[in-house]
Image (cartoon, helix red, strand yellow):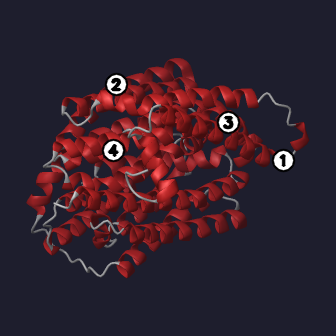
């Protein structure tokens, strides 16, 4: 097993690449979002969002966790990769057939006949996507995240260019669908270009992969209900425009969790797998990783909620003002989500995918109940608040499990995070006070005003956190790790 410093450095560079790549790719996504929001409205996003509810649900319930199985298996052979590739193709074919069969009845259920051709398009996307080169899994398995970055970048750039071009020329919701097609084609081409592996049809290692993935399959089937129930309920009980508002709000408010927590957990997954025989170091890495994620996500989510109105007015336009209260609530749901990627990586590394299935089962029951009551009794915002409540419950359950497994030390986590909580509270007070300052001289320059408000929040939080850390004696904690990245570029030193 690699010594701790070497593993730490590998984890650091992996984290740097994944977070950096996600930030850059998110930057392209933000530009795309801003441009498209000026051309397309909530109705357009809602229409495609309804189709994505069905497609996304099928994608989730058929997810086999094969890439995770290949990463976890340090002795995987070419036959394992061939089998995974073959199963992905079979999965894509199955999803395509189901989508083609349910297109018309689904459109009738959601009262949107325009959904039929869109769902047919997603059927084609699902079938073709299954052929991507499974060899790209080695980018993460071998912690060569620079290649993983470029692999993702090529897809994003291609989808970005095509989506914007089609939207500008035809001003139609089809731009969103055609962009996905372009991204998918780029994925397949780049996967074979960047990876020397040439998989072929083979099912000889089905039993080996399935022994690992069976719990993942069951987990994804159950979890899909909890993940997609919000979109389904809105599609049935609310308007197409509200579906669009919700999807846009979810995208904006979820940025802190998706762009920080997920790449960090993804980078740490191989390192977790290498520490399974050392529970003490495993636990330390889990607490350290979760602490760093929270140190960044907590102020980011709080900031998005505080500045929801200027964000909407700057990034979107007046037609999206109804998204403001939705973003304010969902920003804190994003904070809850941020704890999950690390929980998932740790569970898989511990060879306990059954934990994910069991928690997903419980989650499905209370999520469906809470969201159904919310939307039927309190309308659109009732569902939004229900999402937050379900997220809080899920976060508590997940971390309680890690505690019971002796992976999470609550006392150490609290020691790491009390300064984060206090600095965040100071930031809230400071930003709210700054928002009362007369900035009429910037009338018409909302972007500049938003940037100033954001910078004020960052400075208040950062300075307060560092001062608290210094007063505490520069103890080990997220501040030390973050400062090491900013000042020295070394993992775990300051």
Q: Nearer the viewer, residue 11 or 95?
A: 11
- Cα distance between the residues tagged 4 and 2: 22 Å
Question: What kind of element bears circle 4?
Answer: helix
Q: Nearer the viewer, residue 272 or 383?
A: 272
Residue 375: percent from left, percent from top: 50, 24
**Image marks 1 and 4: residues in contact by CB distance under 8 Å:** no
N-terminal-most mark, 4 or 2: 4
Mark 4 crowd level (few <14, some 14–19, many ≥20, 10 Å Cα): many
Mark 1 crowd level (few <14, some 14–19, many ≥20, 10 Å Cα): few
Residue 366, which numbered label? Answer: 2
Residue 198: percent from left, percent from top: 26, 80
- Cα distance between the residues tagged 4 and 3: 28 Å
For label 1, the residue is 445
For label 4, the residue is 342
Residue 307, which numbered label? Answer: 3
- Cα distance between the residues tagged 1 and 3: 15 Å
N-terminal-most mark, 1 or 3: 3
Residue 122: percent from left, percent from top: 44, 59
Q: Is residue 3 visible?
A: yes
Q: Is residue 236 visible?
A: no
Location of residue 493 with respect to 14 vertically, above or below: above
- Cα distance between the residues tagged 2 and 3: 31 Å
Location of residue 90 with respect to 45 vertically, above or below: below
Mark 3 crowd level (few <14, some 14–19, many ≥20, 10 Å Cα): some
N-terminal-most mark, 1 or 4: 4
């Amino acid at each position: 097993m690699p010594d701790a410093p070497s593993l730490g450095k590998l984890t650091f560079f992996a984290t740097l690449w994944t977070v950096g790549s996600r930030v850059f790719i998110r930057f392209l996504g933000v530009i795309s979002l801003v441009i498209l929001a000026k051309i397309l409205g909530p109705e357009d996003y809602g229409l495609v969002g309804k189709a994505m509810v069905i497609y996304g649900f099928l994608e989730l319930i058929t997810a086999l966790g094969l890439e995770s199985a290949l990463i976890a298996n340090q002795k995987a052979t070419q036959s394992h990769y061939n089998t995974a590739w073959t199963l992905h193709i079979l999965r894509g074919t199955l999803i395509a057939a189901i989508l083609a069969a349910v297109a018309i009845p689904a459109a009738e259920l959601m009262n949107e006949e325009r959904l039929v051709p869109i769902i047919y398009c997603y059927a084609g996307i699902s079938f073709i996507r299954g052929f991507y080169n499974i060899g790209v899994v080695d980018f993460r398995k071998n912690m060569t995240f620079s290649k993983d970055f470029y692999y993702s970048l090529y897809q994003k750039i291609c989808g970005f260019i095509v989506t914007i071009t089609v939207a500008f020329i035809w001003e139609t919701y089809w731009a969103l669908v055609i962009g996905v097609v372009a991204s998918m084609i780029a994925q397949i081409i780049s996967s074979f270009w960047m990876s020397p592996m040439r998989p072929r049809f083979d099912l000889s290692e089905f039993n080996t992969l399935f022994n690992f993935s069976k719990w993942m399959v069951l987990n994804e089937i159950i979890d899909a209900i909890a993940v997609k129930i919000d979109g389904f309920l809105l599609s049935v009980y609310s308007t197409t425009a509200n579906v669009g508002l919700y999807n846009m709000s979810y995208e904006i408010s979820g940025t802190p969790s998706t762009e920080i927590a997920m790449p960090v957990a993804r980078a740490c997954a191989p390192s977790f797998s290498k520490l399974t025989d050392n529970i003490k170091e495993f636990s330390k890495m889990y607490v350290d990783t979760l602490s760093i994620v929270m140190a960044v996500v907590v102020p980011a989510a709080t900031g998005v909620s505080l500045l929801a109105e200027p964000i909407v007015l700057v990034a979107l336009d007046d037609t999206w003002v109804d998204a403001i209260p939705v973003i304010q609530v969902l920003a804190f749901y994003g904070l809850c989500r941020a704890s999950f990627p690390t929980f998932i990586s740790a569970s898989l590394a511990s060879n306990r995918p059954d934990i994910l299935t069991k928690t997903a089962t419980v989650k499905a029951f209370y999520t469906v109940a809470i969201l159904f009551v919310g939307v039927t009794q309190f309308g659109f915002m009732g569902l939004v608040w229900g999402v937050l409540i379900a997220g809080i419950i899920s976060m508590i359950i997940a971390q309680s499990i890690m505690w019971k497994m002796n992976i999470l030390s609550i006392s150490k986590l609290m020691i790491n995070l009390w300064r984060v909580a206090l600095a965040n509270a100071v930031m809230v007070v400071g930003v709210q006070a700054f928002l009362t300052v007369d900035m009429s001289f910037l009338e018409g320059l909302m972007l500049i005003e938003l940037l100033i408000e954001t910078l004020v929040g960052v400075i208040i939080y950062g300075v307060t956190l560092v001062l608290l850390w210094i007063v505490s004696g520069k103890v080990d904690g997220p501040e030390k790790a973050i400062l090491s990245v900013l000042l020295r570029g070394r993992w775990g030193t300051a």
